[in-house]
């Protein structure tokens, strides 16, 4: 199978390949010996944490403030 790189450096993965990875939206990308390697990443746990933070009304700026406070940074 072939996949063509677009002018925006994007590649569409063939349906025959991606169908073997149901529920996977993210891939870790590395290169090794002249090959591009895509490893599926399961983000379910991270998605659950993000949803919980959102339900509590905690935003990224709140986390940054908490880290600064814990480190004693004003």
Image (cartoon, rainbow, N blue to C red):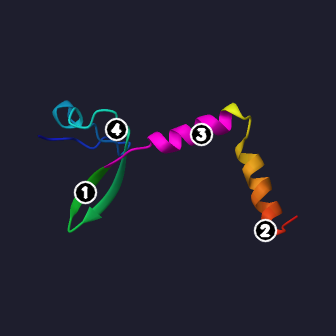
Separation of disc 4 and disc 1 at Cα? 18 Å
Task: State the SS at label 2.
Answer: helix
Task: State the SS at label 4.
Answer: loop
User: Which segment did they paint magenta?
Assistant: 40-54
| Structural crowding at the residue carrying mark 2, measured as other residues with C-alpha within 10 Å and reported as few (<14), some (14–19) or many (≥20) | few
Q: Position of residue 21 (x, y in %)?
A: 26, 37
Q: Which mark is residue 50?
A: 3
Return the residue at label 4: 24
Separation of disc 1 and disc 3 at Cα? 30 Å
Return the residue at label 1: 36
The mark nearer the N terminus, 4 or 2, is 4
Separation of disc 3 and disc 2 at Cα? 23 Å
Which quadrant of the rendered structure holds the N terminus?
top left
The mark nearer the N terminus, 4 or 1, is 4
| Residue depicted at 32% across the width and 60% down the height | 30
Q: Which mark is residue 5?
A: none
Q: Position of residue 64 (x, y in %)?
A: 74, 54
| Residue depicted at 58% across the width and 42% down the height | 49
The mark nearer the N terminus, 4 or 3, is 4
Mark 1 vs mark 3, foreground winner is 3
Task: State the SS at label 1.
Answer: strand
Separation of disc 4 and disc 2 at Cα? 36 Å
Return the residue at label 2: 71
């Amino acid at each position: 199978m072939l996949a063509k790189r677009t002018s925006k450096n994007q590649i569409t993965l063939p349906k025959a390949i991606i169908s073997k990875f149901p529920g996977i939206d993210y891939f870790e990308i590395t290169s090794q010996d002249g090959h591009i390697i895509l490893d599926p990443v399961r983000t379910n746990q991270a998605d659950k944490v993000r949803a919980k933070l959102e339900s509590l009304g905690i935003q990224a700026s709140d986390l940054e403030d908490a880290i600064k406070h814990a480190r004693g940074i004003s």
